[in-house]
């Protein structure tokens, strides 16, 4: 990925932070954003200490003008943007204990505005600056497609985010994939699951090696990734 410019939202912690470090290690210049400037700089320092290059910007993906400016900055660094990873997300409440019938409208609105509308804004505002062979990835999970108790409007928002990805795959010429890394140990999910550093390799594989047929808005889950690794 030498010389590539990769934009990653929600990169101050968890999956986004790990993916940024992994992609930077592969030689890409990463442009990372999050709501917390302090946490973002900590992530950036770790990337620089490992020999990577990084640009940071505090961004709220609920604000399309913030996102627009982010993409302008990213494009000015490398001329075009080679990949975008729409990873920013929120979960209100305790995971698994937010039944839909008890969900507040405030939580519903912020889940939709961050996890779905934020993905839309991220991909839409990137379009004018993308390289011809750019790849767009959206972070999601099985709750977007399955039936699970107690995940409320978070699941609704993730289903909407996957629909956004499918729409961009259908309406543009770019490679678009939905990445389902399985259960990951993050602040959203608690200590159970894969370590973010382990699933970061799945994102890098999707950017570098995933077959074009897998990047048509479809879901690339952990099983698909592991099978591809075994078949190499």
Image (spheres, rainbow, N blue to C red):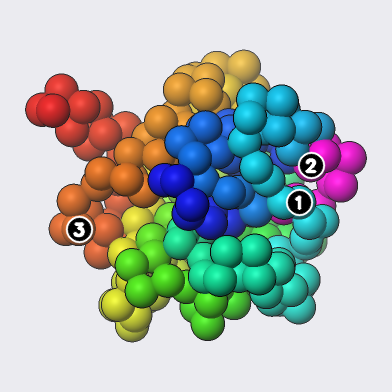
Compute the Cα span from label 2 to label 1.
Answer: 7 Å
Residue indicated by mark 3: 212
Residue indicated by mark 2: 40
Magenta segment, which residues? 33-41
Which numbered dot is residue 202?
none
Instruction: Name the residue at the right extreme.
Output: 38
N-terminal of the two: label 1 or label 3?
A: 1
Residue indicated by mark 1: 56
Quarter in which the N terminus is drawn: top left
Tell me if 146 is positioned left or right of 50 in this view: left
Q: Position of residue 27 (x, y in %)?
A: 49, 40
> Can residue 163 be seen by looking at this rendering?
no
Residue at 37% from the left image edge and 35% from the top image edge: 202
Between 193 and 31, the one nearer to me in the picture: 31
- Is 74 above or below relative to 14? below
Q: Position of residue 148 (x, y in %)?
A: 45, 39
N-terminal of the two: label 2 or label 1?
A: 2
């Amino acid at each position: 990925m030498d010389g590539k410019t990769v934009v990653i939202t929600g990169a101050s912690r968890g999956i986004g932070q790990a993916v940024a470090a992994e992609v930077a290690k592969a030689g890409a210049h990463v442009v990372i954003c999050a709501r917390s400037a302090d946490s973002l700089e900590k992530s950036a320092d770790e990337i620089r200490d490992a020999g990577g290059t990084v640009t940071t910007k505090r961004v709220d993906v609920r604000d399309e003008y913030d996102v627009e400016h982010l993409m302008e900055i990213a494009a000015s660094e490398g001329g075009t943007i080679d990949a975008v990873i729409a990873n920013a997300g929120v979960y209100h409440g305790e995971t698994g204990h937010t039944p839909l019938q008890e969900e507040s409208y405030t939580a519903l609105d912020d889940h939709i505005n961050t996890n779905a509308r934020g993905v839309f804004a991220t991909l839409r505002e990137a379009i004018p600056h993308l390289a011809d062979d750019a790849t767009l990835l959206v972070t999601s999970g099985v709750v977007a497609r399955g039936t699970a108790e107690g995940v409320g409007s978070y699941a609704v928002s993730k289903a909407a985010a996957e629909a956004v990805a499918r729409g961009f795959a259908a309406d543009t010429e770019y490679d678009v994939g939905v990445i389902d890394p399985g259960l990951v140990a993050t602040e959203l999910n608690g200590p159970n699951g894969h370590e973010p550093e382990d699933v970061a390799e799945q994102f890098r594989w999707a950017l570098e090696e995933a077959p074009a047929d897998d990047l048509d808005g479809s879901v690339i889950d952990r099983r698909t990734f592991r099978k591809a690794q075994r078949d190499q």
